[in-house]
Image: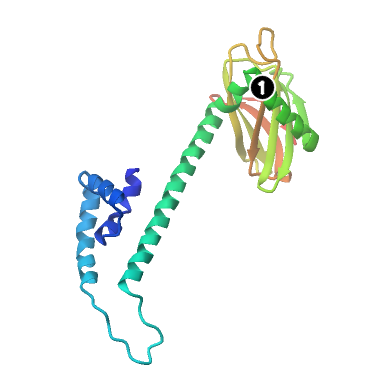
Amino acid sequence: MSADMLHVDVGAYALGLLEEPDRRAFEAHLASCVACRAELDELRGIAEQLDGIGPIAEPVDAAAAPPEPAVVSDLLRRRIRRGRRRRAARAVDAGAAGVVLIGGALGAGFTLGADRGDSASRQDDGTAALMRDGTAFSAADPATGVAGTVVMQRKPWGSRLGLRLTKVDGPEECELVAVDRAGRRHTVIGWTVPAAGYGLPGSAQPRLTLQGATALRPEQITRFEVRTIREGRTLLAVPA
């Protein structure tokens, strides 16, 4: 259990609502957390006041009776459990998002896959499916020699994209960006180019095949750019 999750258990501990495993974990955390100890000192006084409140007599014509203390405790316990489950789910989602972001930034997910036969075949198959169902845009840059095709497919959440790139020299770190109508660049995916490059004499692979996505809808995109990450140099511009 992370320290961030334990910080929010001060109130539940003060009210005696933590279950035994959670109580032991929080007490171990409390020994080294000054902020939680200070908050606990403040909440203990409130908990003692709540504990001393007895039942209040209601008028005969009262609309509804207050819930019993046991009902309140049960509702609090359920709320705490739901909160812990949501925090745990967010932590898992954040970890998964971090893996995706790291893979996109370093190009490990797709680029390493493109260097292996089976994964490269799957990438090619996926991009081929995109080409059947999407719209393809191709271009070549006479200055850099880089040539490529970007395939775009509309999705409810934005656009699914496929990229085939060749004649790329390395070593280099690159990214595919989508440029919107306001001129803003949106990174789609990043990757590394080995020293031998792609589609050049001595290259292990004739081309690099990638797949990615963007929140931009097709009509919002004016062009795609293949850029170097360190220098920000445009290797290829593909009008959309």
Asked if residue 97 is positioned above or below residue 12 in the image, the reply reads: above
Between 74 and 237, the one nearer to me in the picture: 74
- Are there few (<14), some (14-19), or many (20+) residues within 10 Å of tag 1? many
Left or right, 90 with respect to 199, comes to left
Point out the image quarter for the C terminus: top right
> Where is residue 156 shown, x and y percent of the image?
69, 48
Question: Which of 67/127 is in front?
Answer: 67
Residue at the image point whose x is 64% and y is 38% from the top: 213
The quarter of the picture where residue 199 lies is: top right
Residue drawn at x 64%, y 23% as measured from the top left: 119
Question: Residue 66 in the image: x percent, y percent?
Answer: 35, 79
Q: Residue at x 66, y 11 (%)?
A: 203
Q: Quadrant of residue 167?
A: top right
Q: Residue furthest bottom?
A: 61
| Image position, residue 185 (x, y; %) | 61, 38
Q: What kind of element bears circle 1? A: helix
Residue furthest toward the right? 132
- Judge whether 184 appears above or below 235 on screen: below
Three-letter amino acid code at the position of disc 1: Ala
Q: Residue at x 39, y 56 (%)?
A: 81
Q: Of residues 63 and 102, which is closer to you in this image? A: 63
From the viewer's perspective, is residue 77 above or below residue 208? Answer: below
Q: With 39 as the anchor, is 204 left or right in this view?
A: right
Q: Can you say which quadrant of the picture contains the N terminus?
A: top left
151 and 55: which is toward the camera = 55
The colour scheme applied to this rendered structure is rainbow
Residue 10 in which image quadrant: bottom left
Number of numbered discs on residues: 1
**Residue where numbered disc 1 is placed:** 120
